[in-house]
Amino acid sequence: MATTTAVPDLDPRTGAPPRRAGGDLLEGDRPLRDALVREGAGELLAEVHAAGRTFAAGDAIDDGTIANVATPQIVGPAEVRFDPAFHAIMRRAVEHGITGVPWADERPGAHVARAAKFMLLAQVEAGSTCPMAMTYSCVPALRLSDAVAAEWEPRVSSGVYDPRELPAEAKDGALIGMALTEAAGGSDLAGLTTVGRPLGGDAYAVSGVKWFVSAIQSDAFFVLAKTETGISCLLVPRLRDDGTPNGFEITALKDKLGNRSNPTAEVTLTDAHGRLVGEEGRGVAAIMAMIGGTRTDCVLGSTAVMRLGTAEAIHHGDHRHAFGRALSEQPVMTAVLADLALETEAAVAAALWLVRLAERSRAGDEGAELVRRIAAPALKYWICKRAPIHAAEAIECQGGFGYMEDSRLARCYREAPLMSIWEGSGNVQTLDVLRAVQRTPAVLEALLAELDAAAGGDRRLDARTAELRALVADPQRLAADPRGLAARIALALQAAVLVRGAPFEVADAFCASRLADGPPAVFGALPASVDAAAVVARHRPQDG
Ligand SMILES: Cc1cc2nc3c(=O)[nH]c(=O)nc-3n(C[C@H](O)[C@H](O)[C@H](O)COP(=O)(O)OP(=O)(O)OC[C@H]3O[C@@H](n4cnc5c(N)ncnc54)[C@H](O)[C@@H]3O)c2cc1C
């Protein structure tokens, strides 16, 4: 709705604006459409629009609400039961190809299009994105073992949602999870106590206690266990071929801050049969083949938090009037909305660029792989760190209503910190950045070459590139502030992507507000040169 025609049409009881429902989430999201085209998925827009229509629908939004209230329950040693609303969400997501489908799709841009669909789903229901992320990301790990891949890859890439409690071989589609973390530690896996006893060939009997196992309904889990030669990665089905539990006992479901539709379990494994993936004793390297994908999906999830926050904040501001005009037209509020929008656009642009970079790396582009090694942890660190404060500001834009459960942002706020914890928390990402730089100097050279491709587009970006170039020559300064280094790299990459492809007013405003003096502590303190109304107009949701 355009601000010029805004009317005070809030619900008199709750203060809620008319619900955004119906239409097409992609149609109403210009920055995402532009990023899809820029990153090579222009030919696949029709299928992302189809997902956009599905996830904009009122029943999808309602199912998301219900699934987070009527939460899953344990109903058997290895079984949980869900409200039908959660199954409806999962079915839509799988059928739109958000699990392993792109791995069986040769079309360029298939992974980028899937990333956009993931972000659309995450705006409606975030708990379901956890099994989506793991079932999508598992494929490179499955492929470390030909026999395991031959059996499981068709199931995870079938595009069929099959929640029946049957052994995987009897099903038309499967979900995959991972069970790495133990009570003693998640970041540092050296101390894990789960063991794998060899049974001959690639088979092992796995016993131990896993402390966080999400999407516990999955058909199989990658489990890290100690075997004779070190930590190994084993694929452990939840059910045996006869349909009985495979040494699996769900002892509790976690009582979580958010993400409540997604059952995260404590699990005891007793002689659960599993098969080796990758080399024995090289389990951490094997699971990293999967974690590369799930980390990127955390970036996508955080980006979705920002898009939902920006869209809902603008929508609310268009409908609520204070002191004589729409809130979105009050200059101080316009600046806040524009700043939230800038953060969102930079995240969207960088997230899809990162997915494309991974596509190029898989296709054998060594330069892309070098850049990815530093860009992935830097962007995971920074974008996931920005989401919680973005969500808090978006809620405040809605005033008291934002703090109510009726607002879609209350649940979004609880989701926001999780992406920063999952798949390597903030410090772990910054240490990854440092390690990449210190171990492989070519990584920094590749990063600088990537930034140089945007040279001349913005003087503040040029200055940031020069600053990073000077750091390369000073290893002591480089290591002195890992968080600062990761943030600087992430901001430079976001700026470079925007300078190369986004409208001038967006790229210019981003560089002016994020690169000149570092990111401001709060949203809304934009330089006077920024055309805040134009930025808000670009991000105004028109999907319902
Ligand atoms: C809702 C939810 C679902 C989850 N689902 C799963 C799942 O399905 N499967 C699974 O295996 N795990 C799962 N996890 C576990 C998650 O991956 C871990 O919580 C995460 O990896 C952090 O590990 P930790 O909790 O042991 O914290 P720790 O490893 O103890 O880390 C605590 C803090 O210390 C920091 N830190 C760690 N090492 C260093 C260092 N060297 N220097 C400085 N700081 C450091 C970390 O960044 C973090 O901030 C889930 C967690 C949550 C909250």
Image (spheres, grey):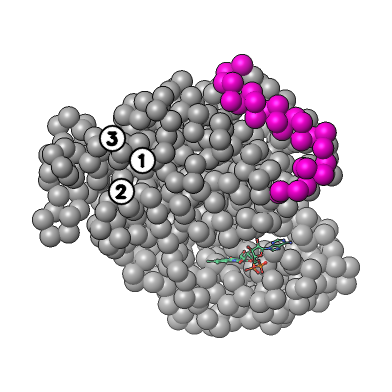
Could you tell me how far apart the alpha carbons at marks 1 and 2 are, in whole angstroms? 8 Å
Q: Nearer the N terminus, badge 1 or badge 3?
A: 3
- Locate the N terminus and report the quarter of the image it occupies: top left
Residue at left 58%, top 70%? Answer: 213
Kindly tell me whether mark 2's CB lies below 8 Å from ligand 1. Answer: no
Q: Where residue 88 sits in the image (x, y, percent)?
A: 36, 58
Residue tagged 1: 336
Could you tell me how far apart the alpha carbons at marks 1 and 3 are, in whole angstroms? 9 Å
Residue 200 belongs to magenta span: no
Disc 2 secondary structure class: helix
Callout 1 environment at 10 Å: few (<14), some (14 to 19), or many (20+)?
many
Q: Nearer the N terminus, badge 2 or badge 3?
A: 3
Q: Determine whether, in the image, residue 270 is placed left or right of residue 127.
A: right
Q: Main secondary structure of the magenta part?
A: helix
Tag 1–tag 3 contact (CB < 8 Å) = no
Q: Which quadrant of the view contains residue 517? A: top right
Placement of 84 over or under 252, stated as above or below = above
Residue at left 72%, top 79%? Answer: 207
Residue tagged 2: 397
Residue tagged 3: 331
Q: Which quadrant of the view contains residue 13? A: bottom left
Q: How many marks?
A: 3
What amino acid type should be assigned to the residue bearing mark 1?
Val
Q: Nearer the N terminus, badge 1 or badge 2?
A: 1
Tag 1–tag 2 contact (CB < 8 Å) = yes
Q: Which residues are magenta?
A: 456-482
Q: Where residue 100 sits in the image (x, y, percent)?
A: 56, 48
Residue at left 55%, top 83%? Answer: 251
